[in-house]
Image: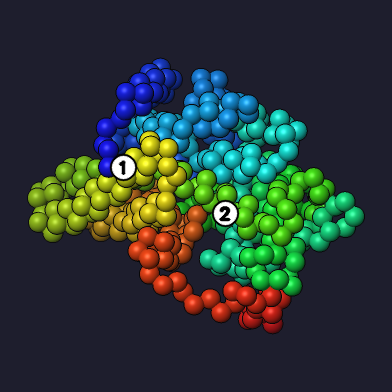
Amino acid sequence: MDLEDTKEEADYRASVRAFLDANAEPRSRSAAPARFYQVNEDRLKIAKAWQAKKAAAGFAGIRWPTEWGGQGLSAIHDVIYQQEEGKYAVPKGVFEIGLGMCIPTMMAFASKEQLERYTGPALRGEEIWCQLFSEPHGGSDLAGLRTRAVKDGDDWVINGQKIWTSGAHLSDYGILVTRTDPNVPKHKGLTMFFIDMHAPGVEVRPIHQMSGASHFNEVFFTDLRIPDAQRLGEVGDGWKVALTTLMNERLAVGDEPRPDIDDLFAFAQKFERNGKPAIKDPVVRDRIADWYAKSKGIEATRYRTFTRLSRGATPGPEASIGRVVNAMKQQEMARFALEMMGAGGMVSDPSVSQNGGEFQLSLLSSPGARIAGGTSEILRNIIAERVLGLPGDVRVDKDMAFKDVPSGRG
């Protein structure tokens, strides 16, 4: 494991810092989380303006081919930019799925003409993309999806429902995985498409969350008609296309979500408990020390991934470790901070709550972190099977035609 940048990486990091210093404000430890949990019209304008500025400066599409407006650099350059940008108060959460997962999938399977049409506007923040994967009846089993696409001449007619689609209410386009053949095993009868989110037959319903945000959505398809030209990959090869999307997700290797262990430590230093700073309480110090050790463990794991990227390798399944640990740690730390506040922990209004309400927002948002991008249970299976080499779960429906798989419905 190499903890130091190469000379080239150090020079690139310096150029990133120069750009950010000139165009963004440093993010103080007292600042509220920068991610846009609730994006209104004004914040969306700010996010689009920032994306356009990044693109003009060459810090968007860092590892995209130059043919499509990118910089043609390595994944480690992308990681370096994300590390440095995380230190500044800039909008996040609007374009990550489209630029990190949807467009790279398009690059692998779409036509040249389609890429000429869609990559530029996405890179500049003019169009937003979402990923339409999860379904109500599928749970954590993506291959158990039921949204149907039926061939009709040169078109496909789509009916079904997706859920937990982040940013669908803001999106102009999306990639959509469907079932095109129920007579074969579930992984073999899937086909991927890209769709216009404003087309007739697409209905988006935001899901109001307990945090007050509504960035997850249900999406309904009623006789949505799209041309075969919008198919990505071969018919029945949708699982392969979906895996390409999920592999791109692994390259989104970021820092610990805020509020992090340093935020909790700073809060314990200034918050009084029994007439003295909470950090003086041995119980508080013991809990913080435990989370600090976990944070350093995840940091070391990230550096292993960075080392692989720096050497030109692809990050492996061990990237799942950080997501499992961080999701639970985020919830535990936020709950502990609220416990220290006592009755004040119930006040979530940032204008009157202690520490700007960031721990309240973190606690209410943390269940989503254990679901988004693969549930913690699925990630633990990945770690067990692909990192530790343990036997896989028994899958009795592996070779069964999907139409014959018991569903428990009606």
Secondary structure under badge 2?
helix
Front in this rendered view, residue 28 or 275: 28
Q: Position of residue 65 (x, y in %)?
A: 58, 30
Q: Position of residue 157 (x, y in %)?
A: 82, 57
Which residue is the site of mark 1?
303
Would you identify the image quadrant in which residue 363 lies? bottom left
For the point 49% across and 52% down, the residue is: 212
Amino acid type of disc 2?
Leu
The crowding category of the residue bearing disc 2, from other C-alpha atoms within 10 Å (few below 14, some 14 to 19, many at least 20), is few
Secondary element type, mark 1:
helix
> In the drawing, does residue 296 fall left or right of residue 202?
left
Numbered tag placed on residue 172 in the rendering: none
Q: In this view, does 37 lie above or below 236?
A: above
Q: Residue at x 39, y 20 (%)?
A: 15
Query: Observer-nearest residue: 75 or 297?
Result: 75
Examine the rendering and report whether any part of residue 181 can be seen.
yes
Residue nearer the viewer, 90 or 385: 385
From the top left corner, tell me how far across and down residue 129 is, in percent.
63, 42
Tell me where residue 145 appears, x and y as whole percent: 65, 65
Looking at the rendered image, the quarter that the N terminus falls into is top left
Q: Which mark is residue 243?
A: 2
Q: Residue at x 56, y 38 (%)?
A: 99
Res. 218 in view:
no
**Would residue 1 be found to the left or right of residue 230 on screen?**
left
* Mark 2 to mark 1 CA distance (whole Å): 24 Å
